Amino acid sequence: MKMACNKFLVAIVGAVVVAATGAAPRVEAQASPAAGTSSPSFEVASIKPNHSGDNRISLMFAPDGLSASGASVKMLVDFAYNMKDFQISGGPGWIDSERFDIEAKMEESTIAALKKLTLEQSIEQRRLMVQSLLAERFKLKVSHSSKELPIYALVVAKNGPKLTKSADAPPGPGAPGGPGPRSMMSLQIGELTATAISMTMLADRIAREVGRNVVDKTGLEGRYDFTLHWTSDRQALSAAGPADANQGPAPSQDSSGPSIFTALQEQLGLKLESQKGPVETLIIESVEKPSEN
């Protein structure tokens, strides 16, 4: 997704926290109802146009609801259906350009039910809530299809992985009978610092950088801590440009640094192999601007 934002933040408070500057992070897990549950939704939601023009965007989940500022419909669709920008087509131009402020709250029974789920199940249920919000308030209708397209397989390089397994995480919410590990990704243009990240989560993040689906075929289980540095296309293009005063300290602008492909192999002992495979796509059939409330 091409966004003219200075800062972008996605947080699922008490579960996964992802922060970024100049990047668009996402949380792993495909939305689907947990066993024995119906599709969840928010109890109440306020949606208002955002005309601030400051390009600041936030999308945050707290234990009791969703708070968004300057969020586009496209961003909400990305999260709700766990899709990347290159997987989504259709819809009018305003779904990318117009921004909204959203405050949505869950009912008490939903909050209690989420506390009993694993981290991944909790994220899946939140995706479904945003799907319901989009359908109810934006009249969103979508269709799905699958195409055979070029993809990358994330595999272990010849000399083996260069990764550090995360130490047992301290207790935190999100798992039945008690807490589960806390996963975190801090993103800047050309830099990823990860704590307790699975290879599936890494593959998802890389896909957004290379514009192609990435499938984890490393065979590496568990979660890992690492920092990855590379030169992204955006970084190289902006290397000679002035820093944005609102963005804070600029990331390294060394456009001669390694590509994401080289960095993965040299720094993490992983590599991307080009393959073909089925890729799910989402088509926006219709969508409407919501009534303000």
Image: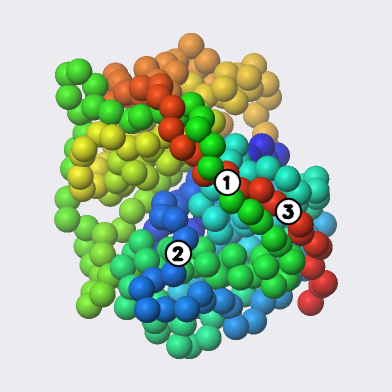
Q: How many discs appear? A: 3
Return the residue nearer the eye: 109 or 10: 109
Q: Which residue is mark 3?
A: 285
Whole-percent x, y for residue 288 in the image: 80, 62
Q: Is residue 148 visible?
A: yes
**For the residues bearing labels 3 and 2, Cβ distance under 8 angstroms:** no
* Residue type highlighted by circle 2: Ser
Q: Label 1's element?
A: strand
Q: Which residue is mark 2?
A: 32
Query: Which residue does the image show at 28% across and 49% down from the upper left?
Result: 196
Query: Which residue does the image show at 42% across and 78% down from the upper left?
Result: 37
Screen quadrant of the N terminus = top right
Q: Which disc, if any, is residue 145?
A: 1
Whole-percent x, y for residue 81 in the image: 54, 55
Whole-percent x, y for residue 225 in the image: 26, 42
Return the residue nearer the eye: 125 or 233: 125
On screen, residue 127 versus residue 121, left or right, reads right
**For the residues bearing labels 2 and 1, Cβ distance under 8 angstroms:** no
Q: Is residue 188 visible?
A: no
Q: Is residue 233 above or below residue 38?
A: above
* Residue type highlighted by circle 1: Ser
* Residue type highlighted by circle 3: Glu
Q: Earlier in the sequence, mark 3 or mark 2?
A: 2
Which quadrant would residue 203 be assigned to in this image?
A: top left
Q: CA distance from mark 3 to mark 2?
A: 21 Å
Q: Earlier in the sequence, mark 3 or mark 1?
A: 1
Q: Earlier in the sequence, mark 2 or mark 1?
A: 2
On screen, residue 12 versus residue 86, left or right, reads left
Q: Label 3's element?
A: strand
On screen, residue 212 versus residue 229, left or right, reads right
Q: CA distance from mark 2 to mark 1?
A: 17 Å
Whole-percent x, y for residue 238 in the image: 63, 22
